[in-house]
Amino acid sequence: MRGGALALLAIFGLCVGAVAFAPAGSGVASWWPAAGAASGLLVLTAPRSWFVYVPALAGVTALANMAGGRDDVVSLLFGVVNASEALAVALALGALRARPWLRTSEDFGRLLVAGIIGAAVAGSLAGVVVHQVLGGAFLETMLDVMASHGASQVLVLPLLLLLTDPESTRQRGWSRPAQVAQAVVTVTVFGVVHSIGQDLPIAFVPFVFLVVGAHILTLRSQAVVSVAVGVMVTVLTAQGGGPFASAGLSPATMGALVQLDIVVIALLALPFSIALNQRAAALEEALASRETYRRGLAESIIGMVMVRPSAEGLVVLDINPPAADLLQVSPDRIIGTDWTAGLGPHRAAVTGAVDRMLAGEIFGWEDELWLDTPRSRCVRLALSWVPDTSSGNLIVAQLVDLTDARLASQALERERDFTEALLAATTGTAIVACDVEGAVTYANQGAARMLSTTTRALCRRRLLTDLYDPAGLRGRVLATDAPSAFDALVDRARTTGLPDRSDWTWRRDDGSPVRVNVHLSPLREADRTVIGYLAVAEDITARQKEHDLLRTALEREQEAVSRLEELDRTKSEFLATVSHELRTPITSIIGFTDLLAQGVTGPVNETQVQMLGRVDRGARRLMSLIENVLTASRVESAGTRRLTDPVDLCAVVQRAIGNVSHLRWGRDLAVVTHLPEGSPVQVIGDSEGLERVVENLVSNAVKFTPDDGNVEVLVAVDPERDDVAVLEVRDNGIGISPEDLTRLFEPFFRSPSAVQGAVQGTGLGLGIVRSVVEEHGGSVHVESSIATGTTVRVELPGVSRRDARATT
């Protein structure tokens, strides 16, 4: 908007100046530059701003007329006239659709027509105002206004269009001297020379320099010079200088001559300069096009040969390096020679095509051929006719190397033939291809053999889904919620892009089923577009029968295992029941034997005491056996238990040693315990089960250690892991051989040394030890050597000292 305000201010100044420099005694200005400036303002602004600038132009022009001494009403009406003229010029130039330019003769023609239209609008409206308001002559006023305003439109408006054109124009030398010379000549003619005789012809002298300037100046500079000359002619004539003022003409005639001079300046300088610019641009474009063509020929990656038909044949005018490489010739040797001489068997076809093009029968010709060169090349040869009025007809030959493509195509054809032969020979596997709609497009002999039909029958209007059992397809449709059976079939392969492998039932033409394993995968183009699907099927009918038989056998075996497990549970329950029933009377025997030995029921002699001791030991042996059987049955039947109770391992050891103390009666054997002082050694587990572990380990150590021997029981916390409790039972007895160590924890296993030494036992103890320890998440290790002794180390998950303190 700031630029628009400045433009309005400039228009106001031009209006006032035109009135001030009107010829003496004339009521009309020689020309009205504000008209061209007002039209330029609308043309160069967006149409959406016209509703602001059109009233503003009317107001500015009205104020200028008021400043010139006209009546207010007349001034306002003249303001409307000037605004209407500017609007008419802008519309005639098409400024409502796009921004007008002044670059070609056509552009100047449109500007000239628009200027005439605007001048006619201004003259007509001004004539009406003068006739109706001032009582003046309509025709005279109209002609005067049209002349002054038309001169402004064709001189000022082009300058504004060129000054705002972003495209740079052709720059020529001697620009500044030409401008200075034009100014000097114009000032001299209209400012210095007054009366030397024949004054009027001198007014044509500046025109010569305008014509010279058209050859030297840019279009934009020429427009500036034209406006400057028009301004100087107007101002100097108004000051009484120049041939028009010195000729003694009336003011009206002098004003008309000034207007005519301005129009001639515009019509002479601008069109001539535009034509010269267009001619120069066309010449430059032609030269650039020719140079581009030659450069394109030289730099093209496609082989190109330019030839001219003549009596000597197709004479080579130019050839680029790719064509020379294809023809395997040197450019220097082939230029100027007959090109068809090297075409071999294709010479007649090429020359015939050229004759038909020259006769106007065809405009181009192309064919694929193998060149008869030392290294055979396959090319696509295209001929084009280029008429050349200056030097005759030209033929441009384009050669595209297809050798690699054709060799690759031949390799693909060989590979395709091999693949087809391989697929045809694959009779044990069915291979079926379909398009994206499911129509079968290929089937090998394996598919025909599997389905008891022919490959032609499979590919004749058959769908892939026709091969499948309908019941199986319905199940897949329900599982995938697909719109059709084919969509359900290919859903997984289409969604994941990966092969889908599953078992199906196919139906032969006679309706009989065949069980197959189908590998369905999508077929894709190079751009990964799916173009179909490939189904590779293997007959698994026999394998399915074997699988069914195997599954039946497995079910029977599982049933047998279940029955065996049931029998084993029954056995365990029986043993537990019998052992429990035996435990009660044995306990009574031990208790009453102890009472008898103590003399509670009466005095007993030494012989009776010995007999009661034997009964007690036998009862306790039987009780230990029963406890082992009960523990083994419980561990076997209970499975994995969740143990959560904290147990003091020291207390367990003390109770267990007390329970087996009868084994040392009458023997010289020391059992030493090493228990930590202070805080207990806690583990998470079953107190009774751990007690049985200690009893079995200590009883074994006592039984296999001779008199004068030692048995040590150690309880401690692992020094490296404070959450691991350690129980060790050491003896210096007879030891265990290395071969017996591997079977030591087998149920009912007794080493040969135990059998030979008549050591009493059942072989259940160590098996129970390992089962109970593993039930507690621990481990047991045995180290032994013959005649040295045995050490059994038990490690159990314990409660760390820190956690034990927190619990306490």
Image (cartoon, grey):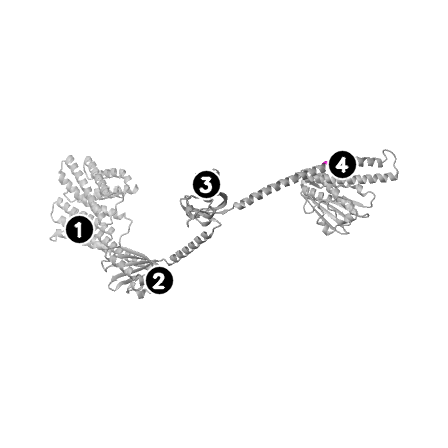
What is the secondary structure assignment of the residue under circle 1?
helix
Q: Position of residue 387 (x, y in %)?
A: 24, 57
- From the image, tell me which residue sits under label 3: 488
Residue type at mark 1: give it.
Gly
Q: Position of residue 179 (x, y in %)?
A: 23, 53
Q: Earlier in the sequence, mark 3 or mark 1?
A: 1
Residue type at mark 4: give it.
Arg
The alpha-carbon separation of the residues under discs 3 and 1 comes to 100 Å
Looking at this view, is 136 or 410 the one in front? Answer: 410
Residue 36 seen from this side: yes
Q: Position of residue 592 (x, y in %)?
A: 82, 35
Q: Is residue 439 left or right of residue 247?
A: right
What is the secondary structure assignment of the residue under circle 4?
helix
Q: Earlier in the sequence, mark 3 or mark 2?
A: 2
**Dividing the image into 4 quarters, which one contains the C terminus?**
top right
The alpha-carbon separation of the residues under discs 3 and 2 comes to 57 Å
The alpha-carbon separation of the residues under discs 1 and 4 comes to 153 Å
Residue type at mark 2: give it.
Asp
Residue appearing at x 28%, y 51% in the figure: 168
Q: Which residues are magenta?
A: 577-585
- From the image, tell me which residue sits under label 4: 583
What is the secondary structure assignment of the residue under circle 3?
helix
The alpha-carbon separation of the residues under discs 2 and 4 comes to 111 Å
Contact flag, marks 3 and 2 (Cβ < 8 Å)? no
Assess whether residue 396 is covered by the magenta stretch. Answer: no
**Label disc, if present, on residue 325 of the rendered structure:** 2
**Label disc, if present, on residue 125 of the rendered structure:** none
Residue type at mark 3: give it.
Ala
Q: Position of residue 87 (x, y in %)?
A: 23, 40
Foreground disc of the pair 4, 3:
3
